[in-house]
Amino acid sequence: MTQALIDSHCHPPSGSSTEWLERALEAGVRECIAIGTDLEDWGRYRSLANEFPDNVHWTAGLHPCHVGDDFEAHLTALPEFLDTVEGKPPCALGEIGLDFTRLPKEQRDLLIQQQSEAFTRQLILAKERDLPVVVHSRGTVPECLSILEETNFPANRAIFHCFTEGPDSLQAILSAGARCSFTGIITFKNAREVRESLERNGLENLILETDSPYLSPEPYRGKLNEPCRIDRIAEYCAEFFATSKEKIAEITRRNTYDFFGL
């Protein structure tokens, strides 16, 4: 029997169409985790998971790029979603973290402060509710690790998604006890350092994601990404680790299930 794949991190499109899910199932991607980023999608992903409980899991969290003057209102609303009692509960808090790229110069210091506060408070919420966290750390791995340590959040319950850095950053994350997940970036010709990290991470620790609708793998680079593309990423990993796609599916499903408690 062919092993079914799982997409550990995606952002399904809005609207009533679920053709993206049909395409995923046709490609052997039986499950995905819809990752929340702000109040606009938490309820939508919860509804999607309730409609397709065998195929869709969901999370809720305030993405650092959505932190602004209204972040307090988002954090006030978040517990209601984390404490969902009817239907399928969230499997993690996220995505949360830090991202200091492209901040407007006149607001940079304030936004960094707000992001750090939002990250800290969400880690505290996750710890109180015994939930793992999905960490966004574009260019901020040391800062994210520092806040994890400051809040005494158990690092083994944190996954640094869409890992795009070299082996040194990967080793810092693994040494802290946290995990990393890899996207279609590993297929890009100019992603040598990320592939070095993939090798250092190893087959037995592997977790895959699309981060769709972004970062389509080759040969689909530049096109809209979907959970079905996990099939291509798994195929690439099978070649990279000189194993079968079935083995990739088995290992990544096991690791994703273990981390998210599915």
Image (cartoon, rainbow, N blue to C red):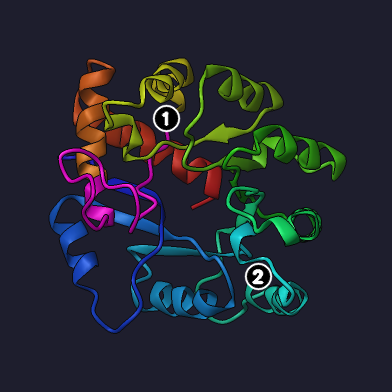
> Residue flagged by tag 1: what amino acid is it?
Leu
Query: How far across and how far down the image is residue 63, in percent?
Result: 60, 60
**Magenta span has 247?**
no
What residue is at 33 percent from the left and 71 percent from the top?
13
| Quarter location, residue 114 | bottom right
| Foreground residue among 16 and 28 | 16
**Can you see residue 129?**
no
| Residue kind at label 2, given as amino acid type | Leu
Toward the viewer: 112 or 171?
A: 112
| Left or right: where 22 falls relative to 128 | left
Where the N terminus falls, by quadrant?
A: top left
Q: Element under label 1?
A: loop
Residue 31 figure quarter? bottom left
- Secondary structure of the magenta portion, mostly? loop
Residue that numbered label 2 is attached to: 82
Magenta-drawn segment: 206-229
Above or below residue 41? Residue 137 is above
The percent coordinates of residue 101 (x first, y second) are: 59, 48
**Which residue is label 1 attached to?**
206
Residue at screen point 19% across, 24% down: 244
Residue 61 image label: none
Q: Considering only vertical position in the picture, is 156 above or below 116?
A: above
For the point 46% across and 21% down, the residue is 197
State which tag comes first along the sequence, 1 or 2. Answer: 2
